[in-house]
Image: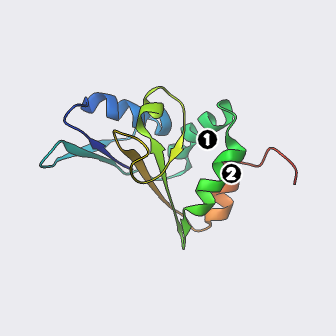
Amino acid sequence: MEADVNPTESEEKVKKALWNLFGDVTTQTKPLQKGAVLTAEAKGLDTLSTLRNVLRRDRVRDASRKPLFQGMSGDAITFYLNKQVAFAGHVSFSEATSESPLGPIKVIVQCENPRELIDWLAPRTTKN
C-alpha cells in the first residue's frame, strides 16, 4: 500500500485511512521534496479481511468487482482507493490520478490466483 502525505495533510490521518481499510498495518514514511509517502506491506488474508468487511457493510461488493478485475495483471491486482473516503471508514475506488485532490491510496495485492481472491474479497451478490 502506498499513499502520498501532502504538505497540507496530517500523517496520522493518512495512517488512519489505511488502518480503517486494512487493520493495524505497520507503516513507513519516506520524506519527499514536497510532503512524504506512506507505505505499508503485509501478508495474508487477515490484512484484506477489514477491506472485505467494509465492502460488505457498504454494500458495494458487486460494484467493486469491476475495478478489481480491471486491475488484474499476472499474479497481482492493483487498485486505487479514495483516501478521504477511507479516512471516514468507507471505501470508494478511484483512478490513479486526478480523481481525488489529495491523491489515492495505491494497493497492490500479489497472490497465486487473483480471480479467486476477488471472489473472496467481493463475492457476487446478484445472479447473472
Can the viewer see residue 121?
A: no
Q: In the image shown, does 82 or 37 lie closer to the viewer?
A: 82
Q: Can you say whether 77 is above or below 104 in the image?
A: below
In the image: residue 101, left or right of residue 108: left
**Amino acid on which the number 2 mark rests in the picture:** Trp
Q: Position of residue 8 (x, y in %)?
A: 22, 31
Q: In the image shown, does 108 or 50 lie closer to the viewer?
A: 108
Q: Secondary structure at mark 2?
A: helix
Whether the residues at callouts 2 and 1 have beta carbons within 8 Å, the answer is: yes
* Residue appearing at x 40%, y 45% in the figure: 104
**Dot 1 surroundings within 10 Å: few (below 14), some, or many (20 or more)?**
many
In the image: residue 119, left or right of residue 3: right
Q: Which residue is labeled 2 in the image? A: 120
Q: Position of residue 96 (x, y in %)?
A: 42, 54
Q: Position of residue 88 (x, y in %)?
A: 47, 25
In the image: residue 41, left or right of residue 58: left
Q: In the image shown, does 29 or 35 lie closer to the viewer?
A: 35
